[in-house]
Amino acid sequence: MLPKIISKKLPGPKTKAVIERDKAIMSPSYTRDYPFVIAKGKGAIVYDPDGNSFLDFAAGIAVCSTGHCHPKVIKAIREQTKKFLHISGTDFYYEVQLELAEKLLKKVPIPGNKRVFWTNSGTEAVEGAMKLARHKTLRPNFVSFIGAFHGRTLGSLSLTASKTIQKRNFYPLLPQVVHTPYPYCFRCPFNLQYPSCNDLCIEYIENCLFGRVIDPESVAAIFIEPVQGEGGYIVPPVSCMKKLRSICDKFGIFLVADEVQCGMGRTGRMFAVEHFGISPDIICLAKGIASGMPLGGFVSKAEVMDWTPGSHGTTFGGNPVCCASALATLEIIEKQLIKNAEVVGTYIKSELNKMKEEFEFIGDVRGLGLMIGVEIVKDKKSIEPDPKLRWKILYDCYEKGVLIIGCGPNMLRICPPLIINKKQADFALEVLYSTFKKRGL
């Protein structure tokens, strides 16, 4: 199925009416890229109240992994709602939560016996991982990366270093967090070239931070997104990830992989960290795990997650309806969508790289699977970010029936549902090309 715009001008009158109602009573802190209102969705197609249909290349920020209203997911949700909606996994037991844990833990790339704690969201998963790391190591401090997005609650926000607006007026945050440069080869913070740089951005942690800023014996964990999300869909070199693992081993520091956005098949592997041949100590999950139902969690070795009853808890985390949705999602991803993400993602990236050769304002195309970023610049020589042009491109695509969102100051974020097919990919690529052509004149 392909999208179709029937309104003479977007947004249509019914869509405008919803937006006006929203402006009057909803928090102005929400960021809205352009005036799209969803009325319903099916697969990779979404509809606004005026009957216009759009190809969803945002997937609710990489959440709707199986598309909108996948019949197997809907069936699982309906069946669970007939049984019970809530009982609190902190205080009681229920099998659907346990069954999901058993199936998921077989896939998590952490060796040995493992345990999981279920949450409602990604930021809660990160907060829980922070608490677990402190509890087990008895160390107070953390290291995170510049460009990182780990959440907006105060603990995870302390790890976040994506946009200053996210922290403005919320200080003081946790004082025991130090940020270090991410392996961002297109914009190397040290103005070097890979691989002759010898992974200086990671060496910097041991040689500079641990030598001058923070005692490594006081660091409980280093948090990293195996593919950085909000920071710009940045894929680090394999050597950098391996070196980071070695540093954590050397100083007894937990390596925490935040897979909230890059996990659950999005990169063409079940977990993005699998691309790098390393095993983290803790993995944080959410977003695509339950096809849009609110669920998150963090996983570690059993001997790490050995805290006593009452050390950590939740009322709604691991909700039975969300777990039922996640069980269906996990089955669909594993059987059908991981390979599709790899194949269709590779195709989209290849076509975008061809466009990169033609257009001066496309500085870089990068990503894994269906997690692809296009960096918009003023020109290839200066590679100065061009956020204004990025926003114009996003709006142009919306008017032509393709929903794309941004990340970082100047990135196009390509993260469609993992069910996307080649025909739909070609439609989106044609829209992008026509938009680039228009803006390149």
Image: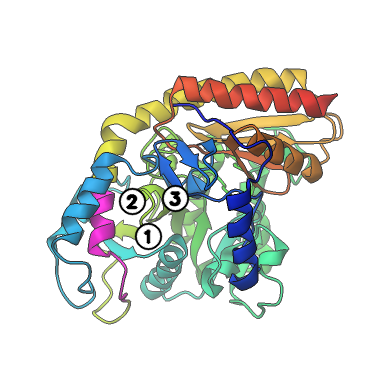
Is residue 304 in sight in this rendering? Answer: no
Q: Earlier in the sequence, mark 2 or mark 3?
A: 3
**Dot 2 lies on which element?**
helix
Instruction: Give the CA distance from mark 2 to mark 1.
Output: 7 Å
Judging by the rendered image, the residue that carries numbered circle 3 is: 259
- Amino acid at pointer 1: Pro
Q: Are marks 2 and 1 in contact (CB under 8 Å)?
A: yes
Mark 1 to mark 3 CA distance (whole Å): 15 Å
Q: Which residue is mark 2?
A: 290
Near mark 2 (Cα within 10 A), the count class, few <14, some 14-19 or many ≥20, is: many
Residue in the picture at 66% in, 77% down: 170
> Is 162 left, or right, of 293 in this rendering?
right
Residue at x 82% of width, y 26% of height: 440
The image quarter containing residue 234 is top right
The tag on residue 32 is none
Q: Does 261 appear above or below 154?
A: above
Q: Which one is nearer the viewer's eye here, 41 or 290?
A: 41
